[in-house]
Amino acid sequence: MAAGYAELLRTRHAARLLAGTLVGRLPNATAPIAIMLFTRAEGGSYTLGGALAAVYGVTNAIGQPLLGRAVDLHGQPRVQLPAVLVSALGVVVLCLAGIDPLVLTYAAVAVAGLFTPPLEGGLRALWPSVLGDGDKVHRAYAMDAVAQEIMFTVGPLLVTLLVSLWSPAAALLVINGVGVLGALSVVLSEPSRGWRSAPREAHWLGALRSPGLLALLGSFFFVGTALGSITVAGVAYGDDHGKTWVYGVLMAALGLGALCGGLVYGARRWAGEPEARLLVIVALLAAGYLPLMLTPGVVAMAVLAGVSGVFLAPALACAFIVVDRHAPRGTVTEAFSWLVTTFGVGSAVGTGVAGPAVEFGGTSVSFAVAGAGGVAALLVLLATRRVLRAPQVGEGGVNLVGACENDRIGVVEPGFSSGHQA
């Protein structure tokens, strides 16, 4: 598996695009914890911190598909370059304003979230034009999912390190400054500047006219809810034990578990339809979230966090393929951005609910929100199995199975072809 990833990274532009996207997404990946720690340092409550993180999540969720559709219509640099600069400006205003007046604080957070560039969906749209071969594209999806877990492992540790060395405001500014550099590396690259979406059917719903995509998004809304609640619950758990670094350890353990799960999942070939496989993975993911409400000692809790993350990367990776199979032609960036949006809204709901849950029911109750989210995600997939079994079909009855946008390369998945998730 590692050799296969190395082969991909030796392909021209591949390493730059992957690294730039991961670095560019650091502000988005670390925003909930960074905003929560910033709010607490400014004297705000858990409820206010959760509300601000929720506003970021909701506005990010609104902005991703809108910007994704704009990218499909106008290309990547013309949309993503101004977006990343405006988003970073919102963070600067937040750090200067603090939490007083609250109107300005909420506005700054909203701007930062709304204009977060759709780098994640953009990268998956670029892979076909960079790699050309369908098997390599699947392998790149797998590599992408695994690399994300490295980011989600390092991100929380980086935030807590910057907070310890300087302050929460400095952490926000540094991470967003680095994120701008990462985004610039992507949007100024030759593949990004040359990419164009495939022709698309004019329809006001865009990618959302696919029933299978809607079913998937409904499920992953609740996966996002679970992850969002863990953000707040982890901070509360750290406060219960009197040490800020405990949160970083828990999030790093969760990310490490997801990294290991992604590596194991991507190391073998998978037969059968990805939709059926996704159902099993989400069931295991839900089972991993439920024990978190036990809130044992730090070492045991870190182990539980790691176990809870094992099936996260496989779930995301398999979901990427399902999105690709159900997205209408010419909507690839928008479709992937809707998955990001679903996570954003779900995460916002999770953070918004977990904040009051901590204050009124304690840390265990806030972790129970994660378990409930996982179970709900499974129930949605069970209820929509028939819809998910029918991938999007384009003009002339051609199964699009993720018609890849730039070269119109059909990325088909016959038993996962080279055996990689997404």
Image (cartoon, rainbow, N blue to C red):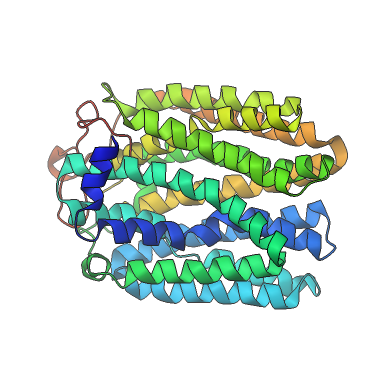
Res. 138 in view: no
| 345 sits to left or right of 414 | right
Q: Is residue 68 above or below residue 390?
A: below
Q: Residue at x 65, y 72 (%)?
A: 108
Q: Residue at x 54, y 33 (%)?
A: 309
- At 85% from the left edge and 63% from the top edge, which residue is drawn? 43
Q: Position of residue 59 (x, y in %)?
A: 58, 61
Look at the picture and state if 90 lies above or below 62: below
**Residue 291, horizontal then vertical, whole percent:** 67, 23
Percent x, y of residue 323: 35, 41
Which of 323 and 247 lies nearest the eye of the viewer?
Answer: 247
Closer-to-camera residue (1/366): 1
Q: Residue at x 57, y 64 (%)?
A: 113
Q: Position of residue 347 (x, y in %)?
A: 60, 46
Q: Indicate left or right for 238 with 388 as reference.
A: right
Q: Nearer the viewer, residue 83 or 187?
A: 187
Using the image as rendered, state which of residue 244 and residue 370 is in the foreground. 244
* In this view, 419 is above or below 337: above
Please identify the quarter of the rendering in which residue 145 is found.
top left
- Find residue 121 and report its image quarter: bottom left
